[in-house]
Image: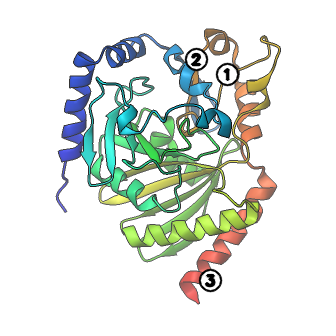
């Protein structure tokens, strides 16, 4: 299948127009050019820390039910700023320029319907976005209870590919820390624990195969966590050389205790979502950027991810469920 760049072309044209015609967007990308970044090296991977004051609203967003009910949904088309334009994506989604960027090019991809953030019934759309925005962008999803600042409105995001270290480091992480759970047809499923993050990844060139595997994963994860609602996860996906790669990060907690510290000297405004977990941690306060350490990063990641014991149990369950589905 020949690559169709119509959505990439339209998105990039939208970006250029919005930077000129929308003052808030122009200011956001002007500010992004001067953000500070530092890099910490760990065992076979790296974590960047970005001081980005423009992300204060998103990082500190109140996502409790009362706060959500008290504000207008900022992703509903009728509530968008007058200057904000959009590109239609198929029949049910929009492509919007994110005016509070982390990436050199950062887009929000909301549904045109005001429906809750939910990946179980929208994973196929996530795969379509990965395919149609390749090879320029990675696509990501924040679960309603682990990073989504609009958990009441279904949306994905897309950002410049290879900006997140995970885009480049995934293969070596898989080789060093990965375990293949199943290989069937074109589908490969891996479990990876790099000491910071617990991941399940899917690789394959068939949409139905990856969708099937994801539904098995979702059911297994929901059962083992005992959650009635969507279990906590962040997802980063891409499509290249006619092949999908989907990395799912398994979360047990939204924000670390340090986020809520009353002592301002101990408080760290770092609210890990997909981009942070992908290797670019966003700190909207300069104090946090200057004082954060490798040890503190490890402490935060360890706190919000499941531990090794849980991951071992889940790997066994997922492998068993996959084998039961494919081999029975």
Report x, y in % for residue 274: 55, 40
Report x, y in % for residue 210: 45, 67
Q: Is residue 53 left or right of residue 65?
A: left
Which dot marks residue 284?
2
How many other residues sit within 10 Å of disc 1, few (<14), some (14-19) or many (≥20)? Answer: many
On the question of residue 64 being in view, the answer is no
Q: Is residue 9 left or right of residue 148?
A: left
Q: CA distance from mark 1 to mark 2?
A: 7 Å
Q: Earlier in the sequence, mark 3 or mark 1?
A: 1
Q: Which residue is mark 3?
A: 324
Q: Quadrant of residue 11?
A: top left
Task: Identify the residue shown where x is 53% and y is 38%.
Answer: 150
Foreground pick, 64 / 142: 64
Q: Earlier in the sequence, mark 3 or mark 2?
A: 2
Whether residue 129 is situated above or below residue 26 in the rendered picture: below
**Secondary structure of the residue carrying numbered label 1:** loop
């Amino acid at each position: 299948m020949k690559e169709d760049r119509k959505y990439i072309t339209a998105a990039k044209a939208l970006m250029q127009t919005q930077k000129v015609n929308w003052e808030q967007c122009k200011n956001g990308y002007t500010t992004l050019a001067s953000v500070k970044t530092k890099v910490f090296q760990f065992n076979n991977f790296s974590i960047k820390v970005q001081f980005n004051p423009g992300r204060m609203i998103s990082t500190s967003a109140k996502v409790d039910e009362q706060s959500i009910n008290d504000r207008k949904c900022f992703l509903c088309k009728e509530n968008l700023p007058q200057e904000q334009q959009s590109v239609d994506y198929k029949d049910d989604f929009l492509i919007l320029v994110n005016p509070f960027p982390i990436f050199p090019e950062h887009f929000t991809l909301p549904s045109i319907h005001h429906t809750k953030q939910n990946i179980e019934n929208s994973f196929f759309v996530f795969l379509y976005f990965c395919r149609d925005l390749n090879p320029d962008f990675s696509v990501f999803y924040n679960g309603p209870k682990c990073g989504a600042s609009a958990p009441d409105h279904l949306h994905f995001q897309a950002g410049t590919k290879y900006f997140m270290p995970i885009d480049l480091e995934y293969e070596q992480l898989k080789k060093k820390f990965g375990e293949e759970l199943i290989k069937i047809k074109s589908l490969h499923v891996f479990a990876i624990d790099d000491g910071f993050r617990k991941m399940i990844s899917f690789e394959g060139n068939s949409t139905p195969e990856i969708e099937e595997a994801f539904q098995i994963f979702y059911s297994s994860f929901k059962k083992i966590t005992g959650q009635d609602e969507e279990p906590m996860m962040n997802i980063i996906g891409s499509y290249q050389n006619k092949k999908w790669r989907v990395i799912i990060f398994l979360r047990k907690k939204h924000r670390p205790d340090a986020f809520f510290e009353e002592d301002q000297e101990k408080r760290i405004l770092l609210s890990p979502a997909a981009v942070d977990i992908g290797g670019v941690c966003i700190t909207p306060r300069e104090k946090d950027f200057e004082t954060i350490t490798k040890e503190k990063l490890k402490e935060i990641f360890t706190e919000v991810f499941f531990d090794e014991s849980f991951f071992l149990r889940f790997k066994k369950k997922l492998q068993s469920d996959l084998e039961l589905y494919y081999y029975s």
